């Protein structure tokens, strides 16, 4: 009992003093880890995307919902008309947008060999520039508060996206999504620098942080629009639609990744990694969504690499700048990957001169290279053959060019010396490598092919040069058709066309019977010319009829005013020359003429 009493005494507290249950400052509570370790391991991470995250807010509003179901209010249907209306033009005229008057006015024109046909023109339609969607369905305009999309026959507003201070946009190839960038909206807790929107609904799909837009677009899309990818330091993040979450809920760890690019024809990503000590540089081709590496190419003594896909994804060219051991200069290798062949074989073309430009033929197996130093700049044309060889088919030396512009249909191209080279132009047919024409558009800043490859426009933009602002229309052969001067002209963009609905077999059949169709088109051209002549005759007849009516009205007025004239002139009628003959005075004037007779015999 004594021990018990002592224990009770020890547990007594002084009056006014309460026990402290606070933890020390350096105490770390690990009870959650001990008790809930298996649960915490499945805790969603920021890099996992939004598939595993449920965000709930404003739950109080659901407390006031009625228990009885009410039918939702029916929304009116918005008819934007036929968004492919321009494709129904009976003369197959392509359209293009023009910004002029230093950006104050924007117009849409239909291309015609005689003169541009105005389709729509508005003042302050955009605050900076415009952008067509990949298939030409929408025209995007820029505003301080966001982006607007226009389309249909009368270019009605289809959709708008609120993104304050937006500067850049990019469409998915399928036109289902649009990506916008603004440097003003980003916050740590709410990523708003880059926003992906649903074009059809106008809803925001997801926001992302972005530190710099120096390499736009930040996100690169797969050709079918099902995936988009982004590269950060040592990481390649691939997202899928429509969830906008990471593929397989994780990013790829690729140490040192420098650049990547999607194939235009397949869901294949090409990326390259530089050398690291004894590990060589490498180019990797990865199939998505399986992430299988279908080809790896090791490279040595690499300074830099550039990835160039052919339009259909049939070939990939990796431009490799190297410094071979024992040399001081830079050698360029063009590593050509044959994507349609088994195990993806690679051919190499080496060039020891500096490279100015490289470009694939869009629908073919040729490529062009500008190389050398000014004034000795050469252009070389190569053909990738099926037998595993790459042949040099032609080289032109001493060219005034710094850019290569292939026709969208292939075969024809323009070699252009833009800006500092004063607009020198060379029109080339690569089927036999002949120069069809050499011309010049002084101080030209841009070259734009129309979607069909029949016409090409050269222009001098007010954004780059403050005088001689205009755009010229040429045929693919280099024949000048039009010179259009626009006050402070800024930008011309051709409206893209969606892919043809014809199969390859149908296209081959059309090419086979081209002579038959040519006769129809020639007849239509003659009819168009005669129509133009008829229009001119009709215009002149209309002007003559207007003059005849005006003359009749004037004669009637003249006759009505005759009494007033007689009154003013004291009854004297001065309208006729033989009036008031009695008041005439006759005066005879004689002229003296000297007469000289010259005998014929003296002649």
Image (cartoon, rainbow, N blue to C red):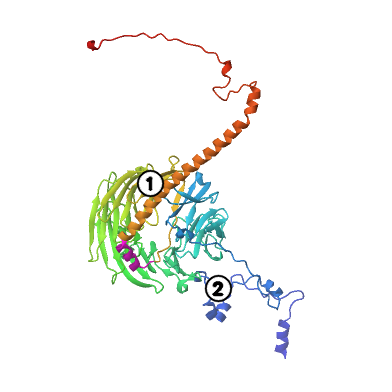
- Can you tell which of label 1 and label 2 is closer to the viewer? 1
Nearest the eye: 73 or 421: 73
Quarter of the rendering containing residue 484: top left
Q: Which residue is mark 1?
A: 481
Q: Is residue 600 left or right of residue 307?
A: left
Q: Residue at x 51, y 56 (%)?
A: 140
The magenta region covers: 502-514
Q: What is the x, y in percent for residue 542?
A: 50, 43
**SS class, disc 2:** loop
Q: What is the x, y in percent for residue 178?
A: 50, 62
Q: Residue furthest right?
A: 15
Nearest the eye: 104 or 457: 457
Q: Is residue 300 magenta?
A: no
Nearest the eye: 315 or 191: 315
Instruction: Examine the rendering and report whether any part of residue 59 can be seen.
Output: yes
The answer to whether 190 is drawn above or below residue 369 in the figure is: below
Q: What is the x, y in percent for residue 146?
A: 56, 56
The answer to whether 576 is drawn above or below residue 586 in the figure is: below
């Amino acid at each position: 009992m004594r021990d018990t009493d002592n224990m009770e005494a020890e547990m007594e507290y002084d009056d006014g003093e309460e026990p402290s249950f606070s933890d020390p400052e350096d105490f770390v509570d690990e009870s959650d880890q001990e008790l809930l370790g298996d649960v915490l391991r499945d805790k969603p991470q920021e890099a996992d995307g939004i598939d595993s995250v449920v965000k709930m807010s404003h739950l109080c509003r659901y407390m006031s919902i009625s228990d009885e179901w009410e039918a939702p209010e029916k929304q009116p249907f918005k008819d934007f008309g036929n968004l492919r209306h321009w494709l129904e033009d009976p003369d197959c005229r392509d359209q293009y947008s023009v910004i002029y008057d230093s950006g104050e006015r924007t117009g849409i024109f239909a291309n015609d060999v005689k003169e541009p046909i105005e389709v729509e023109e508005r003042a302050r339609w955009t605050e900076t520039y415009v952008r067509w969607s990949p298939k030409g369905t929408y025209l995007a305009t820029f505003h301080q508060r966001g982006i607007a999309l226009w389309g249909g026959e009368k270019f009605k507003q289809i959709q708008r996206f609120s993104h304050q201070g937006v500067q850049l946009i990019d469409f998915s190839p399928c036109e289902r999504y649009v990506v916008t960038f603004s440097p003003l909206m980003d916050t740590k807790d709410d990523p708003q620098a880059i926003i992906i929107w649903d074009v059809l609904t106008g809803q925001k799909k997801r926001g992302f942080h972005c530190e710099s837009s120096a390499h736009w677009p930040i996100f690169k899309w797969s050709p079918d629009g099902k995936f988009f990818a982004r590269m950060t330091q040592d990481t390649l993040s691939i997202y899928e639609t429509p969830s906008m979450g990471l593929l397989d809920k994780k990013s790829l760890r690729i140490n040192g990744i420098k650049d990547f690019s999607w194939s235009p024809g397949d869901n294949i990503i090409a990326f390259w990694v530089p050398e690291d000590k004894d590990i060589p540089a490498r180019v990797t081709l990865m199939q998505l969504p399986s992430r299988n590496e279908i080809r790896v190419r090791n490279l040595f003594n690499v300074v830099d690499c550039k990835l160039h896909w052919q339009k259909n994804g049939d070939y990939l060219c990796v431009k490799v700048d190297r410094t071979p051991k024992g040399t001081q200069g830079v050698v360029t290798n063009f590593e050509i990957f044959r994507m349609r062949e088994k195990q993806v074989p690679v051919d190499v073309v080496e060039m020891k001169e500096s490279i100015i430009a490289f470009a694939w033929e869009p629908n073919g197996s040729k490529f062009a290279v500008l190389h050398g130093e000014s004034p000795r700049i050469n252009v070389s044309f190569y053909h990738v053959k099926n037998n595993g060889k790459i042949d040099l088919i032609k080289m032109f030396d001493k060219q005034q060019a710094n850019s290569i512009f292939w026709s969208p249909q292939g075969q024809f191209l323009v070699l252009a010396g833009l800006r500092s080279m004063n607009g020198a132009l060379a029109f080339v047919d690569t089927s036999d490598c002949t120069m069809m024409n050499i011309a010049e558009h002084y101080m030209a800043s841009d070259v734009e092919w129309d979607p069909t490859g029949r016409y090409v426009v050269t222009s001098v933009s007010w954004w780059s040069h403050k005088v001689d602002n205009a755009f010229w229309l040429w045929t693919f052969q280099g024949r000048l058709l039009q010179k259009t001067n626009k006050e402070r002209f800024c930008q011309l963009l051709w409206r893209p066309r969606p892919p043809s609905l014809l199969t390859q077999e149908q296209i081959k059949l059309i090419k086979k019977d081209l002579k038959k169709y040519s006769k129809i088109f020639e007849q239509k051209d003659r009819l168009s010319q005669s129509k133009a002549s008829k229009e001119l005759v009709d215009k002149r007849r209309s002007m003559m009829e207007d003059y005849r009516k005006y003359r009749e009205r004037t004669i009637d007025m003249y006759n009505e005013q005759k009494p007033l004239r007689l009154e003013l002139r004291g009854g004297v009628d001065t309208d006729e020359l033989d009036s008031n003959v009695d008041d005439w005075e006759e005066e005879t004037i004689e002229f003296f003429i000297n007469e000289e007779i010259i005998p014929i015999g003296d002649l």
